[in-house]
Image (cartoon, coloured by chain):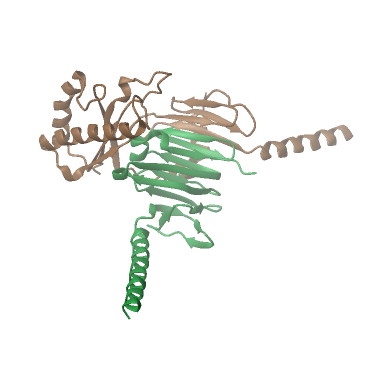
Chain colours: A brown, B green
């Protein structure tokens, strides 16, 4: 009997210790259009990437992260019922197109050049509410130079959109230089995938 | 006499520039709202400095605001770039740093979830600057390259 009492005390202490650990449970979900993104979970000890829907990671302070594990939909619905129920309705959907440029140039590579007419006709047929044209570069050259280059790239794309009939008042130009690479350059500074202009379009969702 | 006039002119110039600064700050205040409440249940509150604000439909939020849903409360908010966040009961979240300034090419989305449950859906910001979004909890930090996830933080 005494042992049982001790065991119970020990169990309660364990529970308390467990609570004090401060656990975060993170679950990746598909969005309303079915798209599944990527999240990076970091602690002081480790990083885990989650890119599959319904995969969950529990982060406990001072412990290594475990690999993502699938979680049952019913459990997700129970745990997150109230937060999911009050989610604001999506008023807009966001689409992204990327075109690539030649080294140190605003000129598009031939694949991107070939895609351009299709892109324009899409934009004219179904006009977005807003278009953000964001220029980027790889890491060859100074930060300042790359900011300028990314600005020139974005402006060149904007000019081409406007010349083809896209309403200039919906276009905003951003220039991010080499700050936001699409792929992390491993040692080398040259990276064709980072010499790019991203077009981010905001479309209103019709009820 | 002319020296006195000079002094007056300088003084006027100083007062004028000071008033410009104050006006500029007043104009800036219109820009400091980063999100808006789209719906809520129960009685969530916002802590802004030492003020406690009762949430209503359309209540606007600023950087450094803390949102507390309380037991039985929940809330949905929409940020300027259409990122949405919703919180379940007994949640506590702070907007640490939100900047959506596309024409100035400045982007930041850093929020802290101290406890409770949250659902996040990305907007324009995560698409334009994928590395700018970070959700911090007491035991982890989550970088987001889109698009939707839920998170539960057990309190201490």
Residue at the location (15% across, 31% down)? A120
Residue A149, picture quadrant: top left
Q: Tell whether A94 sits left or right of A119.
A: right
Depth check, front residue: A51 or A14: A51
**Residue drawn at the location 33% of the way across and 69% of the way down:** B13
Q: Nearer the viewer, residue B94 or A148?
A: A148
User: Residue A127 appears at what percent x and percent y?
Assistant: 17, 39
As drawn, is A147 to the left or to the right of A10?
Answer: left
Residue A80 shows in this picture = yes
Q: Is residue A71 above or below residue B106?
A: above
Which x, y percent locates residue A50?
47, 26
Residue A23 locus on image (x, y percent): 60, 36
For this orientation, the residue located farthest to the bottom is B1
Of residue A142 and residue A10, the one placed in the foreground of this image is: A142
Is B113 positioned to the left or the right of A110 in the image? right
Q: Locate the C terminus of chain A by quadrant.
A: top left
Residue A32 visible in image: no
Determine the residue positioned at 45% across, 40% down: B119
Q: How many marks?
A: 0
- Considering the image in quadrants, where does the N terminus of chain A appear? top right
Res A170 → quadrant: top left
User: Where does the image place residue A99, in percent across and percent down from the top left?
Assistant: 24, 26
Residue at image coords 43%, 42%: B109
């Amino acid at each position: 009997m005494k042992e049982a009492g001790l065991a119970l005390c020990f169990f309660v202490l364990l529970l308390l210790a467990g609570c004090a650990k401060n656990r975060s449970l993170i679950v990746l979900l598909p969005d309303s259009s079915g798209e599944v993104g990527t999240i990076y979970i970091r602690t002081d000890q480790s990083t885990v990437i989650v890119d599959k829907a319904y995969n969950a990671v529990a982060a406990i302070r001072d412990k290594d992260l475990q690999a993502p594990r699938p979680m049952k939909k019913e459990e997700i619905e129970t745990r997150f019922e109230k937060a999911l129920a009050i989610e604001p309705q999506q008023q807009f959907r966001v689409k992204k197109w990327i075109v690539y440029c030649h080294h140190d140039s605003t000129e598009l590579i031939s694949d991107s050049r070939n895609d351009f007419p299709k892109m324009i006709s899409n934009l004219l047929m179904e006009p977005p509410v807003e278009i953000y044209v964001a220029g980027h570069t790889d890491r060859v050259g100074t930060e300042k130079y790359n900011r300028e280059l990314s600005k020139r790239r974005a402006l060149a794309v904007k000019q081409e959109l406007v010349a083809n009939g896209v309403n200039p008042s919906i276009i905003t130009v951003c220039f991010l230089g080499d700050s936001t690479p699409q792929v992390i350059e491993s040692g080398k500074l040259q990276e064709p995938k980072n010499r790019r202009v991203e077009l981010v379009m905001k479309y209103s969702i019709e009820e | 006499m002319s020296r006195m006039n000079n002094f007056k002119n300088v003084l006027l110039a100083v007062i004028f520039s000071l008033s410009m600064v104050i006006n500029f700050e007043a104009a800036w205040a219109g820009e400091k709202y980063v999100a808006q409440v789209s719906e809520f249940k129960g009685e969530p509150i916002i802590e802004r400095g030492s003020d406690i604000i009762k949430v209503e439909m359309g209540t606007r939020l600023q950087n450094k605001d803390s949102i507390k849903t309380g037991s039985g409360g929940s809330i949905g908010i929409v940020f300027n770039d259409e990122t949405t966040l919703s919180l379940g009961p007994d949640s506590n979240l702070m907007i640490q740093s939100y900047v959506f300034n596309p024409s100035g090419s400045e982007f930041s989305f850093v929020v802290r979830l101290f406890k409770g449950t949250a659902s996040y859906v990305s907007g324009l910001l995560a698409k334009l600057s994928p590395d700018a979004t970070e959700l911090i909890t007491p035991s982890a930090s989550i970088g987001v390259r889109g698009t939707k996830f839920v998170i539960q933080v057990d309190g201490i």
